[in-house]
């Protein structure tokens, strides 16, 4: 996230990287942070000096009624928005204002860290620490998920090899292996080669760990028992007679839960300013719901008065799923929503190519506003009045910023400029004030559809109300799958749209605010453990590749263990 | 390891499993254990309440001159020997006698835990704790090695995909992927399928993580700088022109070291009786050297007066490599060697099938003694007078035990019966006394070969002096590889024999003490990072499979997080 998110003009003489800023920061021992947060000592399981896992069962019984502020964004562009940075900065600003605040964030995947983009720990003076350790292995959650996912795969292939009592059709196994890496060569593979001693040959493939259903399951589980129940429900494939085969049929939901026992505990860290932060879980925002765990959010609600959290991609994907999947399963109502916008990103929505972003272009900003406008409209449909965070970047001109603020005023939506990258919480005080104002209003939140509605109706509601489109079309394949889903009695689940994040449509290049379009659903994949139906629109990449110059090439470490080039 | 190692007759009425015993044990906070061991608080990085990583750089500078006791065994049989149990019990016995003692052990792999045999944490009242956490993920070391190994694979395949500047021949890539699981279906696979966007198709395969060269490298590294150097030297394959390609050529040794930074720190835990234990690293004992890390052993030597440690399999494999590879690279000399033997295992070497082990059979015990005799002979050739631990099992009769002790007396070798499974340190006091007597003698240790000798001579020395065989034969393939090794200047490295653990020969069924045999070396694989030449004899399995009834099927966890069926 080097110099990406909200870097202020005054900072141009001292271009420290995020890693350098993180290293200069004085961290407080995690025990102190826990004390600040009201976590008793017996609930704190330290992982080194600055990280801990929280044993939720050892927390004092208290209603989880802290208010939830969701930070979302306009449709992402290659220009960068700085959503995590605003999330952290807003929490620090709320802390500065004396509010008992916690942050809840997703944990980073190693794949992008080694690949191209760096972690998800915020940027500048609005970061969570210790940045290196959060980005590298953290407290082992993703590795535990990888192990559980692949143990299940090994147990499936062993079942085939040892006589296949369940009559699983090797051609209909939908459970894939995972690694927490970007590795395109593993997308399509054949396994079980080499003769009878080495398993049953079949086609397979690896996804990245964050795309594993186990990640979604972990993030939606209320507790260990719920986790085991959900794992047992996962459908791993179908028999020769086309009957679904679950983890429970294989009898290994206990073993998988054993492997995930520690990973289910939320991880406590701190922001640069010492605000307690829970970082836990990080499912994909396309084929999954893209939010940190319910355990983390509800633990934070139990401890703090305000919980600032984020969801992946733009409001059409992350916020929609936050409302319909996470909030519903977590039994809470979001109380306020911040939509992050930047002049740069709006200019791209207004048609400016990335290379020309540095030039002032007020009309392009104006031309991009309809994208923000649709996201505002969406949040209002959920019964919440959004607050806009105009996250300032180094190249933004005062005129461009003024353009956005004026538009917001004209359209009656609250907006504040944030300078959290450079100033930390100090740069988010105005935003914090607007958020507090919103939190003091009565909660009018309501989901847009009933889960008991027909699947096509649920999809149509999202296409019309959230994407601003017209109609939904199902391919023959999806229609056939839908028949199976209804026959199996799986249709009363929320839908989880897997759509490009760059456009409201299923075509990445259509930025801005397209209208009158149709969304084509190519496949509907039941995720019984997670408890949703994934609707695939367009090609969704579940195993990224590395770029020509991977970030790994720039990483190094000296004799004393000082890391450089992490980001 | 349920009811496997040294369980005493008196214990038959209360057949607690290892897990039940472990759960009943009262652990002391790891901070107290660290204090006992003389580890200052600033060097302790807690992982929960009962585990810690040790920041070796924060230890007081002190010569690492604690004496090293190696626990090895006769050639293993399906009857079980209880080597880890004796190692832990001996350390507790030494502690009871007032000696400042530490244990250094390998860490368990998840593959066997899920598969069939349980962990490597000892048994009964001679265990290291917390047993569940050591067996499940522990402090993330194996996961970090998996991640580093597979990040390298992804970077190699990305290099091919992005233009292959180094001209790596995809058919000659020897670097394989790994998972910490038993998964036979991944032994032979094809990757990069699906068209030009998804990499370059080639044959590949997965090993189990403990077979990764990175595991061997981590265990042999003196510090971070040495680790990076070694990682850089790893040969991942060859160019179209048959030139070796190293990790340094790819420029990613820094990134791999970054991923392994925390994994390089030894892990502190405790025995049931509170003796400090470092558990760190666990390379295969066939295609690698099968010992815990040099970092752990030398850290323990820095802190304690006596370090009790073990090596994999029997003395022909584990002890030989401990002497020639680990001690040499770690710059220490072993001071005493314990050879673990059991009546059961000796009976199997004497020709008794596993089903008939419960019947008393003195003549079979006698017939099996030559196996022990050869291991004694081997240890003496290294200049050390071994001590025999006769590890008592429930079915052993007093007559059988007496048979072994009489044989030892006749052959002038010190021997003690151990009851550590049932009695903890109390059951190892006699062994401890014999070991202390040995430690008080001057150290006469010397390796059996000079690393500068010719490769064939080094192998021949091991075959004759350690295995008791006659000759060594190289296949045409191995001969060809040897020419390449010499041309590349890699021949002045120790050899790492990959041989069946069940026999001194390369044929698993030839138990006891065969003579006059020839060992056939099929392949010689240079491991430049680890710093040895692997000599493959027979088929060596580097990715185990799961059995028909995997241990995973019996595992469960309740609402409170209590695990059952782990072992």
Image: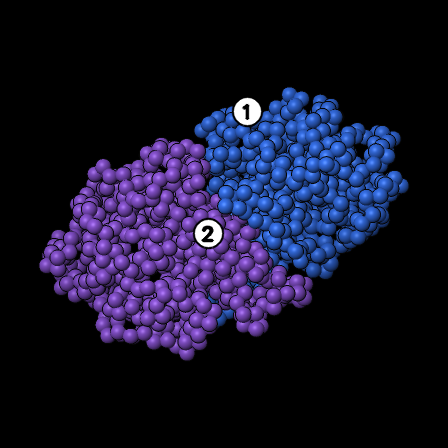
Chain colours: A blue, B purple
Q: Residue at x 72, y 50 (%)?
A: A499
> Which image quadrant is residue A335 in?
top right
Compare residues A87 and B360 and report the one nearer the observer: A87
In the rendered image, the vertical position of residue B305 relative to residue A553, given as above or below: above
- Residue A242 x/y as whole percent: 58, 61
Task: Please give left or right for residue B217 compared with residue A242 in the image.
Answer: left
State the mark number for residue B409. Answer: none
Give the spatial CA distance, label 1 vs label 2: 41 Å
Task: Please give left or right for residue B69 compared with residue A479 in the image.
Answer: left
* One can see residue A250 in this view: no
Work out which residue is located at the far top of the displayed protein and give it.
Answer: A98
Q: Residue at x 73, y 50 (%)?
A: A500
- Mark 2 Cα shell of 10 Å, populated few (<14), some (14-19), many (≥20): some
In the rendered image, the vertical position of residue B467 relative to residue B389, given as above or below: below
Task: Name the residue beneath numbered marker 2.
Answer: B226
> Which image quadrant is residue A5 in?
top right
* One can see residue B468 in this view: yes
In the rendered image, the vertical position of residue B409 relative to residue B492, given as above or below: above
Find numbered disc 2 in the image and state the secondary structure of the residue it sits on.
helix
* Numbered-mark total: 2
Judged by depth in the image, the label closer to the viewer, 1 or 2, is 2
- Residue B359 x/y as whole percent: 17, 59
Of all chains, the one bearing label 1 is A
Task: Name the residue beneath numbered marker 1.
Answer: A36
Do circles 1 and 2 both sit on a common chain? no
Callouts 1 and 2 close, C-beta under 8 Å: no
- Residue A415 x/y as whole percent: 79, 30
- Residue A394 x/y as whole percent: 76, 38
Work out which residue is located at the far bottom of the displayed protein and give it.
Answer: B476
Q: Residue at x 48, y 41 (%)?
A: A262
């Amino acid at each position: 996230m080097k110099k990406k998110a909200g870097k202020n003009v005054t900072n141009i003489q001292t271009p420290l990287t995020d890693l350098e800023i993180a290293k200069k920061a004085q961290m407080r021992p995690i025990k102190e942070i826990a004390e600040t947060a009201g976590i008793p000592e017996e609930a704190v399981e330290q992982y080194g000096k600055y990280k801990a896992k929280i044993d939720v069962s050892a927390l004092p019984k208290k209603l989880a009624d802290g208010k939830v502020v969701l930070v979302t964004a306009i449709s992402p562009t290659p220009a960068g928005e700085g959503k995590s940075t605003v999330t952290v900065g807003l929490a620090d600003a709320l802390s500065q204002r004396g509010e008992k605040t916690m942050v809840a964030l997703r944990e980073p995947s190693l794949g992008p860290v080694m690949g191209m983009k760096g972690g998800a720990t915020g940027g500048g003076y609005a970061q969570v620490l210790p940045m290196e350790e959060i980005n590298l292995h953290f407290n082992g959650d993703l590795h535990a998920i990888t192990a559980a996912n692949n143990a299940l795969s090994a147990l499936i292939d062993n079942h085939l090899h040892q006589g296949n009592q369940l009559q699983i059709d090797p051609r209909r196994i939908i459970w894939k292996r995972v690694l927490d890496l970007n590795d395109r060569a593993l997308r399509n593979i054949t396994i079980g080669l080499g003769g009878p001693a080495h398993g049953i040959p079949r086609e397979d493939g690896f996804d990245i760990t964050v795309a594993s259903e186990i990640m979604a399951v972990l993030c939606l589980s209320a507790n260990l028992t719920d986790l085991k129940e959900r794992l047992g429900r996962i459908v791993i494939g179908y028999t020769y007679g086309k009957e679904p085969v679950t983890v429970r049929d294989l009898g290994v939901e206990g073993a998988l839960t054993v492997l995930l026992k520690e990973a289910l505990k939320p991880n406590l860290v701190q922001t640069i300013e010492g605000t307690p932060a829970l970082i836990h879980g990080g499912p994909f925002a396309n084929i999954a719901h893209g939010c940190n765990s319910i355990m983390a959010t509800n633990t934070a609600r139990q401890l703090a008065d305000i919980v600032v959290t984020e969801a992946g991609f733009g409001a059409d994907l992350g916020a929609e799923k936050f409302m319909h999947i996470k909030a519903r399963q977590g039994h809470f109502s979001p109380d306020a929503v911040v939509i992050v916008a930047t002049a740069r990103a709006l200019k791209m929505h207004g048609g400016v190519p990335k290379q020309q972003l540095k030039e002032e272009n007020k009309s392009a900003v104006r031309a991009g506003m309809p994208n923000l406008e649709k996201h505002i409209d969406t949040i209002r449909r959920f019964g919440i009045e959004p607050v806009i965070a105009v996250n300032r970047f180094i190249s933004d001109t005062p005129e461009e910023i003024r353009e956005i603020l004026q538009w917001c005023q004209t359209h009656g939506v609250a907006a504040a400029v944030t300078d959290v990258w450079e100033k930390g919480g100090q740069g988010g005080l105005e935003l914090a004030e607007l958020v507090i104002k919103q939190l003091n209003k009565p909660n009018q939140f309501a989901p847009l559809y009933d889960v008991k509605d027909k699947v096509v109706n649920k999809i149509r509601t999202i296409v019309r109300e959230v994407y601003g489109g017209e109609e939904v079309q199902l391919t023959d394949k999806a229609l056939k799958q839908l028949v199976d889903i209804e026959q199996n009695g799986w249709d009363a689940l929320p839908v989880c749209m897997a759509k490009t994040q760059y456009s409201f449509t299923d075509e990445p290049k259509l930025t801005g605010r397209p209208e009158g379009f149709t969304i084509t659903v190519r496949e509907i994949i039941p995720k019984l453990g997670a408890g949703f139906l994934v609707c695939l629109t367009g090609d969704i990449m579940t195993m990224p590749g590395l770029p020509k110059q991977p970030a790994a090439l720039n990483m190094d470490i000296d004799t004393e263990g000082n890391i450089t080039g992490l980001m």
